[in-house]
Structure formats: structure tokens, C-alpha cells
Image: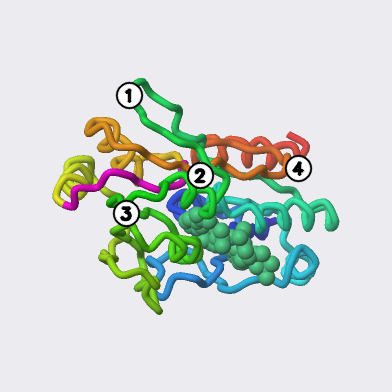
Amino acid sequence: MTHRVLILGGTTDARQLAERLAGRVEFTVTLSLAGRTANPIGHPVPVRSGGFGGAEGLANYLKEQEISLLIDATHPYAARISANAAQAAEQTGVKIFALRRPPWPRQPYDRWTLVADAEAAVAALGSHSRKVFLALGRQELGPFEAAPQHSYLIRSVDPIEPPLGVPDATYILARGPFALEAEKALLVDNRIDAVVAKNSGGTATYGKIVAARALGIEVILFRRPALPEVPAADTVEATIAAIDHWLASERGV
Ligand code: NAP
């Protein structure tokens, strides 16, 4: 018997997990994306795209598609879909695992200011003009229009359309991973004195944090949101081990 698996993705971890499970005869895997990125990277399994319509919609999808295993491998700041996944799994009795990258721990010489959200980041930047590197998603940029005194360097995967309503903003289109030396050069060349970012964990986007530490630059870091309590692992490897354990128990081994 093959298990139908739905991976909620939008992360490198989700893609790697899909790659690993794709080769296994016990599983038929579908990866789900929110559909925000215009040209997502190719995936090794069939992809469905777009919201489900809340926890209820996801529960219906799980039933219709006869999913027996749901894996929440979304970004640690994608709190709504994680809450919906936990609720839909509970409602349908579908087994759920989460793959959650642990946050980067604060190191000596890190100059971190922790904030709840973009509005709080704007407040933390203060009233004097600064050169700010915004390493955030498109959806979080709006509040920075309330602080037009700063110069912004904005890096995103897709173009910011319409551009931010501030007089001084420079846009870079790029997709990680980002190497440390290039991140250092970016901060130095643009005379950045504050980085605004999320504590995403993992290695792909850690370069800017290490670069800021080395250069003594302040990092205004969003606190992680609360996530539902479901069985969770913090690496692709550990998630596969948890899935195998579950598979063995399903077979009564
Ligand atoms: P969110 O606030 O938790 O979710 C908002 C809504 O988007 C959900 O209620 C759901 O709509 C839909 N959605 C989110 N992820 C989905 C998925 N994998 N498949 C299908 N529908 C999904 O999420 P977000 O922060 O906007 O993130 C959206 C996507 O980008 C996620 O896949 C996440 O892994 C990825 N991502 C997020 C960040 C970040 O910083 N937030 C960073 C990198 C990648 P319905 O309620 O209609 O089902």
C-alpha cells in the first residue's frame, strides 16, 4: 500500500524532503505552494499551488485526495498555514509532522534588537536617517513607507510592484543561498547601518547575520511567531526518521 503524502512547502527544506521521498515506493507525494513566487524553482514531485481556503478547505482537500500523511515544512514565519495544518490534521485524523528549522542563536558581538513585526521594526529604526537593508518578503514592506527618512536597500525574489512609496529605495532581485563574502560586500558597498530580517534559521540566509556581526551592524530581527504543537523535527534527515518510525508502527512492525 502506498501512502499519499502532502508536503506544505515554499522552503528549501520542503523541496529537499520531497526529493528524498519521491524515490520511495511507499509514498505518492504532492507538494503544495502558496503560489506567491512567479517562477518557483522546479520540484521533483507534482506541485499544487494556491491556498486551500483555511483549515476547513485543507481538511476537505486531505479527505478528497485521501492523504494519510501531512508534512508542514513551511517557513517558520508562515504561522497561519501551520495553524491550519494542525487543525485540519486533528479534524480529519491525518498524521502530521512539522519540519521546523531551529532559530539562529544569538552569538557574542551580535547587535540584535528583537521586534514583533514590521511596525515595531520601523519604530526601532528611529527618527534619524539610516541606511537600511530590508531582507523581508514583499508582504512585510508596506509599514516602512511610514519612515521615508531612511534609505532602503531591498532584496526580493520577485520585483516589488508597485515600488515602495519612499524617496530613496534600491532594489535587488536575488534568490538565496547567499555567500558570506558577498553579503559583507553588499553591506559595506551600500554603507548599510541596519539590517531588518527574520530569524529563519538554516544556512542559506545566515550570511547577512554573520556579516553584520563582523561589521558591528545592528540587526533588527523579527521574533518567531508561536506555532502549533505537533510532532516536529528540525532537519530533513530527522523528519525522514520520524516518518519511517510512523510507517513501521502503521505496519505493526
Ligand atoms: P501564512 O501567512 O502562514 O499563510 C497565509 C495563507 O497562504 C494560508 O492561510 C494559506 O491560504 C496560504 N498558504 C500558505 N502556505 C501555503 C502552502 N504551502 N500551500 C498552500 N497554501 C498556502 O504564509 P506566508 O507567511 O504568507 O507564506 C506563504 C508561503 O511562503 C509558505 O509556503 C511559506 O513556506 C513560504 N515562505 C514564507 C516566508 C515568510 O517569511 N513568511 C519565507 C519564505 C517562504 P488558505 O488559508 O487559503 O489555505
Q: Which residue is disc 2 drawn over?
A: 222
Local crowd size for mark 3, using a 10 Å CA cut-off: few (<14), some (14–19), many (≥20): few
Residue at 78%, 58% in the rendered image: 88
Sequence-wise, the earlier of marks 4 and 3 is 3
Q: Which residue is disc 3 drawn over?
A: 176
* Residue 160 image point, x, y percent: 38, 72
Residue at 32%, 24% in the rendered image: 109
Q: Residues in magenta?
A: 190-200
Q: Which residue is disc 4 drawn over?
A: 250
Local crowd size for mark 4, using a 10 Å CA cut-off: few (<14), some (14–19), many (≥20): few
Q: Amino acid at mark 2?
A: Phe
Q: Which corner quadrant of the figure contains ligand 1?
A: bottom right
Name the one closer to the observer, 118 or 38: 118
Sequence-wise, the earlier of marks 2 and 3 is 3
* Residue 243 image point, x, y percent: 63, 42
Q: Which residue is disc 1 drawn over?
A: 109
Say how many tags the image has.
4
C-alpha span from label 2 to label 4: 39 Å
Q: Amino acid at mark 4?
A: Glu
* Residue 31 image point, x, y percent: 55, 63
Sequence-wise, the earlier of marks 2 and 4 is 2
| SS state under label 3 | loop
- The label number, if any, that marks residue 98 in the structure image: none
Q: Amino acid at mark 1?
A: Tyr
Q: Is residue 246 left or right of residue 111?
A: right
C-alpha span from label 4 to label 3: 38 Å
